[in-house]
Amino acid sequence: MSGGQGPLLRTQGLTKEFGSGRTLVRAVRGVDLTVDAGEILLIEGPSGAGKTTLLTMIGALLRPTSGRVVIDGLDVTALGQRELPAVRRRSVGFVFQTFNLLETLTAQENVEVALNVAGVSGAAAHARARELLVGAGLEQRLDLRVRGLSGGERQRVSIARALANRPRLLLADEPTANLDSRHGRDVMQLLRELAKEEGCGVVIVSHDGRLRRIADRVLTLEDGRIVGADAPDDRPPRPVSGARSG
Amino acid sequence: MTGRRHGPRRQPRWVPVARRNLLAEKARLAMSICGVAAAVLLILIVTSLYRGWSAAGGVFAELPGDVWLAQSGTSDPLRTPSFLPADRLDELARVPGVRAVIPVYARRVALSQNGHDLNVLFMSLEAPSAEAWPADVRDRFLPEQGRVTIDGVFAREAGVGVGDEISVLGHSLVVQHVYRGGNPLFETAFLNSADAAELLRVDRFVNFFALVADPGVDGAVLSSRAVAAVPGSEARTAAQFAAATREMVHQGFLPVVGVLVAIGFAIGGAVIALTIYTATVEKARDFGVLKAIGASEGFVYGIVVKQSLSIGVVGAALGVGASVVVATLVRDRVPEFVTDLRPWDATGVFAAALLVAALAALVPVRRISRIDPATVFRA
């Protein structure tokens, strides 16, 4: 259910360069990709491949050197700096590798504060946060501070927070990297269930091969370029089709 | 069903991020609040002392007499000697509108009592006995012959009380009454007029005439008539005389008070600013997370302002409360520190503390605006 006729997310020639002259680093080079509503896209690649840089540009946190990011028909790269927070709170949800929960708040409050940021408060925020956390299996942990939660529970709270404002696009950066295999499996399952339930497109960047199980499509990024596209099974990468590197 | 029944827990409308941030570091919060409270305490105690000292000349407003006649050129009754011819008493008594004329004698006398050097303003009112003076006027200002009334500072400094004897210029006087009040500039005492004539060596002169007006008589009219009756004199109301004394205190102490108050505000502001800046730096990652999930600069900055104002409100309230206690204790135990803590002063300082707290919240503005939300992706 994208705002336009095309995919939910489209990047065109997305490029990011840091530094200049002899210190110039091309972190992302002309990436084109698309994500449809309800689709889970996994972007794999080794450390330093540019995965996180790509994700932060898609999430309107980092301006590309060139190229476009279109979310739900809106070209976010054409927006001014002051307009980007509104895009992030309405259209994008983030799941971080290190969870990035606010330590002084409870699980419930960490989700509610995301709703507060979007102007939702009081009973409405409380009910929505509770609904998501119960859905994440945290009904008994609502009032616990972050330090009282396990790593897996923290990531569940982080996912609930990311979905709080019903974003069209969910961006996850190494969501299982800090979790053991059991918690990693649980989080993957939750991510898939909630994303499908909420009907949002998902982009996951990771070098954790286990995430292929929940992905609808897999892209491989190396040296800032997409070098392969793949089905989520264990077939070797095939030549890029529908995504190109520039 | 067993057990207690609980009603639905009331939920705050917004997640109290600011409060939680502050309470996360209780020791630092306590120190910050105490710092603000100490600054407010300093400001209010200095201000209340200033107010109290300003009232040093208030004794003239409390003495009987609507219009005071002094020698021309008398700037204030404490520093400028005033001599008027005593023989003008009858002339003044005949001035229309004058109900009673009170010759007033005043002289600063240095004396030593119980090893303490004192600088006492001795005054005496030669009040007509026919007048029905109120009891508090009699008790404070009209002692019997051979007796003296003294202020609390005099009593404390000299180590004397009611019934004790003091020696004034070789004469022994018994303390009849100790009245509340005093100031750090000089002690005050009242003599019987018969003793004053002998002790203060007044003969053909009086220092002032205090005129009691008939009911309904205009003070200005009475003043002009009285001045006409005593050549070389000028008239002031009791309030003007008191104001002239206050002005003397203002000139001496206002700059000092101003500096101390400014230091107090600077300390309070610095304490809040340092706390808020430190808390902001510590929570930079949290603020980055909030920005990443879409919080505007205003939302984040609102948290910082709430933190700052919370410290300001609690600290200032504590400071005002402490000031009331300290001002009362000081007044009771150190009489020369005449404190006068006024509600409007406390309200003004409280409001100013909040203003300083709001300004202190501006300190981390640049720090907040520099927080890059993309950094939260770094592990």
Image (tube, coloured by chain):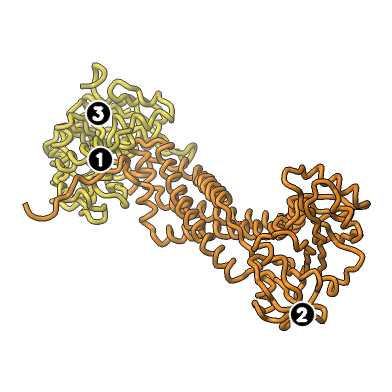
- Residue B69 location in percent, x, y? 84, 53
- Residue B338 location in percent, x, y? 64, 63
Q: Residue furthest top?
A: A5
Task: Give the camera-side residue of B102 and B330.
Answer: B102
- Badge 1 amino acid: Arg
Discs 1, 2: same chain: no
Element assignment for label 3:
loop
Chain identity for the colour orange used in the image: B
- Badge 3 amino acid: Arg
Q: Residue furthest front?
A: B130
- Badge 2 amino acid: Ser
Chain identity for the colour yellow used in the image: A
Query: Which residue corresponds to mark 3?
Result: A168
Name the residue at 43% across, 43% down. Answer: B371
Discs 2, 3: same chain: no
Q: Earlier in the sequence, mark 3 or mark 1?
A: 1
Query: Which residue corresponds to mark 1?
Result: A161
Q: Badges 3 and 1: C-beta atoms under 8 Å apart?
A: no
Query: Which residue corresponds to mark 2?
Result: B112
Answer above or below: position of B69 versus A159. below
